[in-house]
Image (cartoon, rainbow, N blue to C red):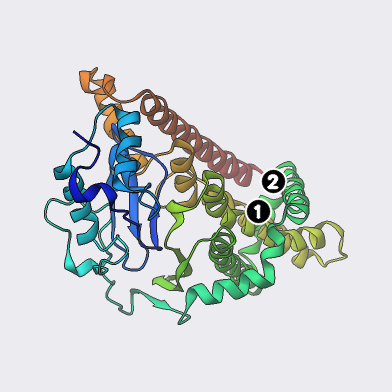
């Protein structure tokens, strides 16, 4: 059988310009690729063989040529029925150039794979909880911020900044007892306590914007910037639509890490004032408390549990989607010595236990630090 017999052999399909494809990702015992239409938000999962074919639909190669490559890689040739099924799926989802885009409300085509993530239903806005977009065009706003501050992501500036952050955190660790007492004393000064709380809130806002600016730096698109409240908490948020589809894993990790780094960079001037400026005792202690609380805030975001930034980083390091659920399912099988556990690929058998072990260690370290801090405050 030819690679694509009949009229299909010469057909040169092309994906729409805004179709995004991810790297291979572990999904339980399977390896999948995510495909998303950035115009409509539709996304779904395909296997490695389907991805092999789809990624080669560039408008230059014919189905005959793609079929020959597929036969060389997988040892079998595809007939008309296979091509028609795949083209029908891609066309129905509006992913092929010349096919109408399908909105999320239209639903999947018959026989299509299940969506990787259904379109979110807007949350009802009430006095107690809700969200509110702050800008009409979040991507344009982020582009302006990137033009103004993107130079900070260049290595000649970023490396010294990170070195200063590491030096600051070394000082915070060495003088943590002093900072703890300062944070305790802050509770007795409502004015400085309020000022510190405001600065920490500003730090969280910059945290979110840093995600957006870094995503823009690597070619990503920011869908929304706004406020989200779960009273009494009110925070900013920044939604990066195509984070999982960035070109390299390093760019995805950098985007997830940017928020915590921004939290720590924000503390640098206050650290300099605390160390070197002639401040009165109350202000000196307030800056000390800000350094401790801001550092805790930054590192708390790196705990590898969903939905924190640390979980996104862990997912990228493991090369997995749905890492927590997949790791839990694998460990349950492994502890029961189920034969199904042995069917997982080697990469999954390493990544899932490693994620669980690191998470337990991080949580144990967090509890130990909290116990040590409490003991210091009670005995100092």
From the top left corner, tell me how far across and down residue 87 is, in percent. 22, 53
From the top left corner, tell me how far across and down residue 35 is, in percent. 33, 52
- Name the secondary structure under disc 2: helix
- Residue at left offset 70%, top offset 43%: 173
- 288 is higher (above) or lower (below) than 360: below
- Looking at the rendered structure, which numbered label has been put on residue 176? 2
Say if residue 57 shows up in the picture: yes
- Name the secondary structure under disc 1: helix
- Looking at the rendered structure, which numbered label has been put on residue 292? 1
Do residues under tags 1 and 2 come within 8 Å of each other at their CB atoms?
A: yes
Marks 1 and 2, how far apart in space? 7 Å
Residues 67 and 289: in front is 67
Label 2 neighbour load within 10 Å: few <14, some 14-19, many 20+: some
Q: Quadrant of residue 12?
A: bottom left
- 216 is higher (above) or lower (below) than 298: below
Q: Earlier in the sequence, mark 1 or mark 2?
A: 2
- Looking at the rendered structure, which numbered label has been put on residue 239? none
Say if residue 184 shows up in the picture: no
- Residue at left offset 61%, top offset 64%: 187
- Residue at left offset 35%, top offset 36%: 69
Quadrant containing the N terminus in the rendered view = top left
């Amino acid at each position: 059988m030819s690679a694509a017999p009949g009229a299909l052999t010469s057909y040169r399909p092309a994906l729409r310009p805004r179709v995004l494809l991810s790297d291979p990702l572990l999904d339980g015992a399977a390896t999948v690729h995510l495909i998303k239409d950035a115009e409509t938000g539709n996304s779904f999962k395909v296997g490695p063989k389907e991805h092999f074919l789809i990624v080669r639909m560039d408008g230059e190669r014919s189905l005959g040529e793609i079929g020959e490559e597929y036969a060389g890689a997988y040892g079998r040739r595809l007939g008309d029925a296979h091509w028609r099924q795949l083209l029908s799926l891609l066309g129905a989802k509006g992913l092929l150039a010349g096919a109408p885009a399908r909105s999320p409300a239209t639903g999947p085509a018959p026989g299509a794979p299940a969506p990787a993530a259904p379109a979110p239903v807007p949350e009802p806005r009430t006095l107690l909880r809700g969200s509110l977009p702050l800008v009409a065009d979040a991507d344009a706003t982020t582009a302006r911020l990137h033009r103004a501050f993107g130079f900070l992501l260049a290595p000649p500036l970023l490396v010294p900044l990170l070195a200063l952050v590491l030096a600051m955190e070394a000082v915070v660790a060495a003088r943590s007892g002093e900072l703890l007492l300062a944070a305790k004393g802050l509770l007795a000064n409502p004015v400085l306590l309020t000022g510190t709380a405001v600065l920490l809130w500003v730090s969280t806002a910059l945290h979110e914007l840093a995600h957006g600016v870094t995503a823009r730096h690597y070619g990503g698109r920011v869908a929304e910037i706004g406020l989200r409240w779960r009273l009494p908490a009110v925070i900013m948020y920044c939604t990066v639509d195509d984070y999982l589809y960035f070109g390299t894993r390093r760019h995805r990790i950098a985007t997830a890490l940017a928020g915590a780094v921004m939290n720590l960079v924000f503390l640098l001037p206050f650290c300099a004032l605390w160390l070197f400026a002639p401040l009165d005792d109350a202000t000196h202690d307030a800056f000390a408390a800000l350094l401790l609380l801001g550092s805790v805030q930054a590192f708390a975001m790196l705990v590898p549990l969903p939905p924190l930034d640390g979980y996104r980083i862990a997912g990228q390091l493991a090369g997995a989607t749905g890492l927590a659920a997949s790791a839990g399912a694998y460990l349950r099988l492994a502890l029961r010595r189920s034969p199904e556990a042995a069917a997982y690929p080697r990469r999954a058998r390493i990544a899932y236990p490693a994620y669980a072990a690191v998470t337990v260690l991080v949580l144990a370290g967090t509890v130990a630090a909290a116990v040590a801090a409490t003991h210091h405050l009670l005995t100092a």
